[in-house]
């Protein structure tokens, strides 16, 4: 039992060491290449534009969807409804 707990402690220590090295490496690369990592708030998906289209493309897509919705409504309204007693 004693060796099992020691192996977990060793593994945990090694994982912390690797995490420390990776974080230092990422920090170094950010300063070396003048990189900025976007915040999570800036990269959240816009509910009105989930694909990230430009303004014209988004308006064109909304018009196509509205036309498709009207067409679908016309087709559905032509389906005869039979009421059963």
Image (tube, rainbow, N blue to C red):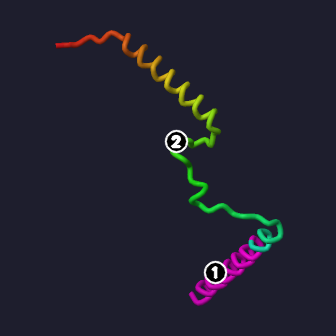
x, y percent for residue 37: 69, 63
Tell me the quarter of the image containing the C terminus. Answer: top left
Is 63 positioned to the left or the right of 36 in the image? left
Is residue 57 within the magenta segment?
no
Marks 1 & 2, CB-CB < 8 Å contact:
no
List the single residue furthest toward the front: 55
Q: What residue occupies the far right of the structure in this picture?
A: 32
Q: Quadrant of residue 59?
A: top right
Residue lying at the far bottom of the rendered structure: 2
Q: Is residue 25 magenta?
A: yes
**Residue of label 1:** 12
Q: Residues within 10 Å of mark 1 (few under 14, many from 20)?
A: few
Mark 2 lies on residue? 48
Residue 43, horizontal then vertical, whole percent: 61, 55
The residue positioned 64% from the left and 39% from the top of the image is: 54
In this rendering, position of residue 60 left or right of residue 35: left
Q: In which quadrant will I find the N terminus?
A: bottom right
State the predominant SS element of the stretch in magenta. helix
Q: Is residue 67 left or right of residue 39?
A: left
Q: Element under label 2?
A: loop
The segment highlighted magenta reads 1-26
At 59% from the left and 35% from the top, the residue drawn is 58
């Amino acid at each position: 039992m004693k060796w099992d707990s020691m192996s977990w402690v060793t593994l945990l220590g090694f994982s912390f060491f690797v995490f420390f090295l990776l974080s230092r490496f990422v920090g170094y690369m950010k300063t070396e290449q003048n990189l900025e990592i976007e915040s999570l708030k800036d990269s959240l998906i816009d509910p009105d534009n989930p694909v990230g289209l430009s303004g014209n493309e988004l308006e064109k897509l909304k018009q196509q969807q509205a036309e498709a919705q009207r067409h679908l409504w016309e087709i559905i309204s032509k389906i005869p409804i039979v009421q059963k007693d």
